[in-house]
Image: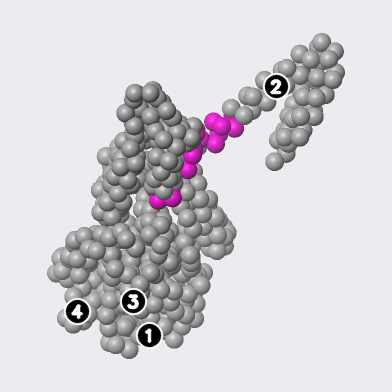
Amino acid sequence: MEQSLFIYNTLSRQKELFRPLVEGRVGMYVCGPTVYGDAHLGHARPAITFDLLFRYLLHLGYKVRYVRNITDVGHLEHDADEGEDKIAKKARLEQIEPMEVAQYYTNRFHDAMAALGCLPPSIEPHASGHIMEQQQLVQEIMDHGYAYESNGSVYFDVEKYDKDHRYGILSGRTLDNIKDASRELAGVGEKRNQADFALWKKAQPEHIMRWPSKWSDGFPGWHCECTAMGRKYLGEHFDIHGGGLDLVFPHHECEIAQAVASQGDQMVHYWMHNNMITIDGKKMGKSYNNFITLPQFFAGEHERLERGYSPMTIRFFILQAHYRSTVDFSNEALQSAEKGLQRLMDAWKALQRLAEGQKVKGQPQVEMKYVEELRQKCYDAMNDDLASPMVISHLFDACRVVNTLLDKKASITAEVAQALIQVFHTFAFDILGLTVDTGASNKEREAAFGAVVNMVLEQRQQAKAEKNWALSDKIRDDLAALGFEVKDTKDGQTWTLNK
Ligand SMILES: [Zn+2]
């Protein structure tokens, strides 16, 4: 690994040189979705941020085990310890099995992630498939005296833990702040203190998702799964844990407390968090009517959208901001991202035509030194806490060079052109994860293909009118070879695509 990668560690609040625990290998855990609804922009951002990190680590030659979970049980409404399970609620409303809800939205999440060009994680564990591991974690925490049972549920004793360790180490909150913030809430109920959080919840009679345990028939608290599954697949100590900034408190704070309370020390070396996305300056939320899902973005089916935006436009839009800054979505911002992406892709296509080099007498040459500097500038940007906007700006600089070549204001040898192609490919495609994309949504593309078929069929109609049966049959057969079935009906020709 010749490159020195610095990443911002939320725990130390500074950029640190990344050094893996085991040379050449990286263990990385990212909090995945709770699968009770379609993914939205807020899911796209962590997925793309950690895909960028995953791709860069792979590019640097690390063997990476990337674990991203699927939360299919235990995530209660309002991220609280009371209320209905998010998935069970959806299942009740739609009168289907909770696991049908989870599977349906897991499949749709995978489709959206693939469209955004995110590589699949190495392991994608489900919370419901790791109940034993979570029960074991709860038992260890109880054995060390940091949890108590109350009416069949088990709670983490935050006050006791805070005396021995420090609760709030990641978020910078103190127990007093946390207590102040929660004072207005309803009584503590089964908990000793309002700040305590559930490790195991006794299921109410109507609750379908339940498992037997020594405490009660119930289900694990939301924070348990990531600690239990992270440890199972990455070990007691691993390199990177990521997620959205909204997960710092309480989710990740609770994960740290669970790890320390169960095994005596922290599990994670580098905590990384991506910032949030706002829509027209406002937080995303159902109450603002700005809650736009990824399928709606792709299809342009939401009143806030002027039209659809391709998955690659969304990826590029997100990468144009540093992952630790906020991003504000607007139609204008996405349209400008679409143009930027188009510029990059146009330059990429033009570069292919310049691959053999180009001689223009008396014009300045694009030197190998330029390409080498470009490559190093892109690495420097990635090494500086994944500064993707800087990488993009360096690639735009390369686009300008390509334009001077196209205008024949400069020339390039085949050797330098090949090197430039390689730098462009490495950063735009391998690392930023962009793919050549027309910028149009699938629907627009389908409409364009359909219009072409209709044009061809008009030619066939013309041939038939002229009794040119050979041409008319040829058009039908050629279309059939491409999978288009043409039928002649009383009202004219119809076609279907058998693919
Ligand atoms: Zn998590």
Is disc 1 in contact with disc 2, using a CB cutoff of under 8 Å? Answer: no
Q: CA distance from mark 1 to mark 2?
A: 70 Å
- Quarter residue 200 falls in: bottom left
Q: CA distance from mark 1 to mark 4?
A: 19 Å
Dot 3: element: loop
Give x and y (percent) for residue 363. 34, 25
Which span of residues is magenta-colored? 430-447
Quadrant of the image for the C terminus? top right
Question: Which residue occupies 35% across, 44% down?
Answer: 318
Is disc 3 in contact with disc 1, using a CB cutoff of under 8 Å? Answer: no
**Which residue is labeled 4 in the image?**
165
- First-in-chain label (1 vs 4): 1
- Mark 3 Cα-neighbour bin, 10 Å: few <14, some 14–19, many ≥20: some
Dot 4: element: loop
**Which residue is labeled 3 in the image?**
237
> In the current view of this chain or complex, which residue is farthest to the top?
466
- Mark 2 Cα-neighbour bin, 10 Å: few <14, some 14–19, many ≥20: some
- Between 494 and 304, the one lying in front of the other is 494
